Image: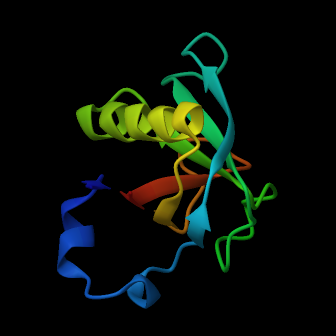
Amino acid sequence: MKIRLSPIAAILASPAAFAGGTWSNVTVLHEQECTSECSSPNGFAKFELSAASTGGPSCATYKNWVAVDITTPGGEAAAALLHYARISGAKLVSVLGTGACTVSSSNETLSLVNY
């Protein structure tokens, strides 16, 4: 199952086309939700993965965490999938970042999850 957060992602042919970080064959270790009270104007969830990303932006000081905007339908679906992967212990085939830290200033923003 793939959850895509951006229509642009469907156009790109390979993970190499992304400027963001890439995680392969990882599990989700932890998750943390930050509501709008602690992150104005939007809330987000962040997920710790079992390995650090390859590549990714310099703003992502925590290379094994990815942030998800939970205020959008795509973000809610991706967060639900990552939550399920954490509680089931399932491996994620690939996780791709956007190349920016738009949701959390120290974590790369999620672009795509391939489950």
Which is nearer the eye, 85 or 10?
Answer: 85
User: Does any portion of residue 97 appear in the rendered image?
Assistant: no
Tell me the quadrant of the picture where the N terminus can be found. Answer: bottom left
Could you tell me which residue is drawn at 57 percent across and 68 percent down?
25
Res. 17 image quadrant: bottom left
113 lies above or below 71 = below
6 relative position to 104: left or right: left
Q: Residue furthest top?
A: 37
Tell me the quadrant of the picture where the C terminus can be found. Answer: bottom left
Number of callouts in the render?
0
Tell me where residue 32 appears, x and y as whole percent. 67, 27
Tell me where residue 2 appears, x and y as whole percent. 28, 58
User: Does any portion of residue 7 appear in the rendered image?
Assistant: yes
52 relative position to 91: left or right: right
Colour scheme of the rendered structure: rainbow
21 relative position to 2: left or right: right
100 relative position to 78: left or right: right
Could you tell me which residue is drawn at 57 percent across and 15 percent down?
35
87 lies above or below 93 = above
Could you tell me which residue is drawn at 53 percent across and 36 percent down?
88
Which is nearer the eye, 92 or 31?
Answer: 92
Tell me where residue 81 appears, x and y as whole percent. 40, 39
Tell me where residue 84 appears, x and y as whole percent. 46, 33
Could you tell me which residue is drawn at 31 percent across and 35 percent down?
77
